[in-house]
Amino acid sequence: MKLYLLLTFLCVGGLHEWPICARAFSKTPVPTHTALSQKHVNSFKPTLLYASSVSPEKDRLDTNPSTKFGSPLSDSVKEMNRFAIGFLKGTLFDNLFIGEDRAYARFYALETIARVPYFSYLSVLHLYETLGKWRRSKYLKLHFAESWNEMHHLLIMEELGGNARFSDRFVAQHLAVGYFAFAALLYLINPVEAYNLNQDVEEHAFATYDEYLRENAEMLKTKPPPKAAIEYYLEGDMYMFDEFQTECEMRRPEIRNLYDVFVAIRDDEMAHVKTMAKLQTELDISSMNEGECEIPDHI
Ligand SMILES: [Fe+2]
Ligand SMILES: [Fe+2]
């Protein structure tokens, strides 16, 4: 039984080209290794969870990551993801963190949990590299830059006192561990689904910060920026900051007070949304640091 579970995990996770996987999971007779045509190899791709809504025209095969790295999602699956994330936010976050004085604790928990998918993607990509299956160093760099950005959001929330209560740390950190495993498994099964789900998470993060900014603008403008924000947005090496702006937006946030810090964080969340959306439809991504973007002279 244990052996079967391990085999299922490996086959679904990416080793479905192995003849042993084909034998175990295909009902049709399996050709011998020497007779294994590309058509047969393609037919072994895991399709157990998601129906395709994209027509398989030949000219899309080279540009759509779904054909090389995961499976395309139907609109109903995207809708289901949106509902699941909205439901979790409404039941968990909106009940655990009620009231103005709980805002920083809420953001601390959000940042602890929301950066975890990037660790999961990195772990799976390392696994693929180790197995010699898929080499994509750009994705490693991008997702590490995204996790670096989210880590600084977390440092800012900690400096603001969001992690003061043991109960908040306990809940956030335990959820993060569970979410790591879930996101890694999802990324193994279908990276497009993992990116889509995280796009919804990042959209909620953007909306949460945006609402907080609108409701607390005057108060935030009277407070100084945390040290972690000054170091990251003003004094730090901007290489990592630029690396996750896949839309070629050269952003240089102004940090004069706490309001500016929350504006920068909110805009970072939108950059993550755009990156997650892009990775569902394009295999390649632009990097400012590799000269793939046109940067205006005045910046
Ligand atoms: Fe964040
Ligand atoms: Fe985020």
Image (tube, helix red, strand yellow):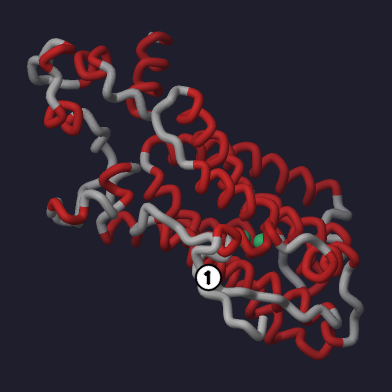
Counting from the top left corner in percent of width and height, residue 87 is at 49, 59
Q: Answer with the quarter of the image where residue 270 lies.
A: bottom right
Q: Circle 1 sits on which residue?
A: 248
State which quarter of the image contains the C terminus: bottom right
243 above or below 256?
Answer: above
Res. 227 visible in picture? yes
Counting from the top left corner in percent of width and height, residue 91 is at 57, 59
Counting from the top left corner in percent of width and height, residue 103 is at 76, 69
Residue at image point 8% right, 20% down: 28
Q: Is residue 204 left or right of residue 158?
A: left
Asked whether mark 1 and ligand 2 are closer than 8 Å, the reply comes as no
Residue at image point 56% right, 68% down: 271
Counting from the top left corner in percent of width and height, residue 94 is at 63, 65
Label 1: few (<14), some or many (≥20) within 10 Å?
some
Res. 90 visible in picture? no
Q: Answer with the quarter of the image where residue 233 lies.
A: bottom right
Q: In this view, does 74 lie to the left or right of 89?
A: left
Amino acid beneath label 1 = Cys
Q: Residue furthest bottom?
A: 218
Residue at image point 91% right, 78% down: 224
Residue at image point 73% right, 53% down: 151
Ligand 2, what quadrant?
bottom right
* Residue at disc 1, secondary structure: loop
Q: In this view, does 270 lie to the left or right of 16?
A: right
State which quarter of the image contains the N terminus: top left
Count of numbered circles in the view: 1
Q: Answer with the quarter of the image where residue 297 lies.
A: bottom right
